[in-house]
Image: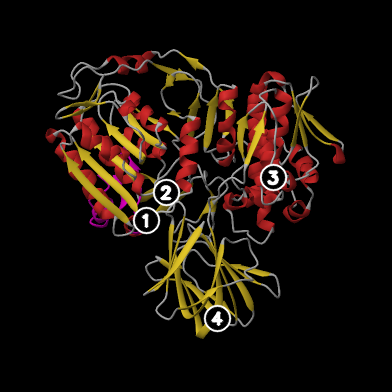
Amino acid sequence: MIEWEATDDGLRVADAEAVELLVRSETLSVEGPGSGVGRPVDVAVAVTARELRFPNSVVHALSLGHDRRQELDPAGNPLELSRAEYLLDVDAGIKTYLRFAGEATVERSDDFEHVVVSFPDRRRAVLGFRSRHELPAGRIVTPPEPAALASALTKLASALKTTGPDRSYPTLRGHPPLLAVGEEPSVPAGIDAECPETGIEIVVEPTLERLFVVAPLAYYLGATVRVGDHGPFVRAPEMAVERPIEPDAFDREVARLLRRCFFLDSLVRNAGPYGTELAELSMLDALELDPEELYRASPPERLAAYLEVPHAAVEHRLPDWHLATYVDPEPTTVEAVPFLLDRMSLIFPARTTELEGRELIERSLADFYRPGAGEVASVDVVKPELREGRLHGWLADGVPIDVFNASPTAYHNRLERLRRHRESISIRVVVNDPEMGPEGEDVTETFHGRAEELPIELTVEEGLSTAELARALEDENEFLHFVGHCEVGGLRCPDGTLATSSLDRCGAETFFLNACGSFYEGRELIERGGVAGAVTVATVLDEHAVTVGTTFARLLVYGFSVERALGLARRRIMMGKDYTVVGDGTHSLTGDLPTTVRLERFEGGFGLTLDCFSAGEAGRYYVPHVEGNHHSFLCGTESTFVVDRTALSEFLREIDAPVIYDGDLYWSTELSPAVADGQGPP
């Protein structure tokens, strides 16, 4: 859902997740709803203006009459467009298109904060906007038997907006229909009609475990899933292609095939209308693959070509896969599958081993932690067997380290939040121990600083009673940060303890219970309406809690998912494994695409490495605004540059992102002055 409104200085556009886009213009007149954009959009607006300013983004200009496509130079050189009809593709947080006729200049502002489109005179144009997030089209009911589930999994591909290589763009993959387990199967007519006929089949043995593992590959390929005793294999009868999947390495082979197809699609798609100058494109020449031919090929033809590429030829160039989820294949977890596919998660069986060595030692250090803590609820943790993935989710019994503890309830709660429109981000800070005031002050200052760019409504409260804290947790907030203590009986208040299991509902979308042993209280909040939250599984040092809490809050409001924000915050302390995430750890408070900077110092300059990815944006690309760079990079692929002190200081000043240097975490805007003065990095 997209909503828009004319403002004094342009047009404000927002989607259901409170991702906001400002199209600035002092000359703008809004005529009303528009049409004829020529691309899939949620809403179109007809406008008249002489100049339009968009957020700094990757921009392509397509000449509609000549099918000529140009990309705006990341380094700052303008595009001078001669008289013709154009479609501008602006890859902002909300996908934006601008259609107009005539001459125009497209350039980046001097401070690189905006893309400016200017016309010789006032010009009529149509703006089209498409949200990067969608709601599922309906619900499929399936019996839990393997054959029925295979048929249901086939229908999930109805959410694909194309079966061509452009499906690797996140905006062209919709949210799959929901799944529910029931005795009588049913599929809404609309979903049945939208299900693609690709001519690709995947056959596996009739077990839920095999079906869960193969679900992401089947969804992405738009394949028909069948069960049989002669599998597993992938085949395309039209091409007389049949590729066995090694049964003893089934999980690994399926993951490899999905990653290979996704990566090659991300390269081949650049032969189409949405392409960019990807740094990885040379890979196609090395593999002797023709992108134009493959872009026009049928799904079976393209799959046959991809199957001929040995995994060893691409494995070292594959972007890091963003997410893996470990699932007990049970009827109770079937309903979570569409949510995992929406995030393009790999799915593996859940397996654990015992803690050993340093991990076991860290778990035993709990004697002198957070002063004032009473009896803390103990959590027995295990070590998961992790596979490829930047983030890891857990949908099984046990409380493992290094993963977020998901639940089907959390995914459904997130969906309900998407259906609600919000005009601002409501944040609540509760400090229930006066000795921990510094953390509350630091967190509050962080949110105040971000309020200049985001519509944040901030409430700060201290010393809440059990009744007052219950109301605070039940009230609607996008984020609640609790600073205090947690005991076996619940969250400590001046008049006792509050067990979150006693709440009627949880109104906090995300939360941080920065208190000793808050895991079970956080899990109860998820079951009562929360989407994701940071919690602890043991007692923690007060100093550590302040460091983690403040860093987490800052990362969260800059677009990092709950799991990634906590992961980066934990690296600042020794006992990071005492913190974990409950709920959907991929959930983020804002729709920004976050960037992490890694900095290395050597004689004569600096090594600058950028890492840009989000679990909800698999297949997206980014353009580093580093002097001399003319390429884009797939999210999940790091980009590295060598810069001098002056260029580094300017880059850090503009990017406003976390910087990892010498094992610690800094903030770019705070590091920039020290670099400019020749005093930094520390």
Find disc 1 in the rendering and name its residue. 655
Q: Amino acid at mark 3?
A: Ile
Residue 498's quadrant in the figure? Answer: top left
Quarter of the image with the C terminus is top left
Q: Mark 4 or mark 1, which has the lower sequence index? A: 4
* Magenta-colored span: 654-682
- Single out the mark in the foreground, 3 or 1: 3
Q: Amino acid at mark 2?
A: Thr
Residue 627's quadrant in the figure? Answer: bottom left
Q: What label does residue 573 carry, if any?
A: none
Q: What label does residue 595 carry, if any?
A: 2
Find disc 3 in the rendering and name its residue. 191
- Closer to the camera in the image, 598 or 517: 517
Find disc 4 in the rendering and name its residue. 124
Q: Where in the figure is residue 419, as x and y percent of width and height?
A: 48, 49
Relative to 459, does residue 333 appear above or below in the rendering? above
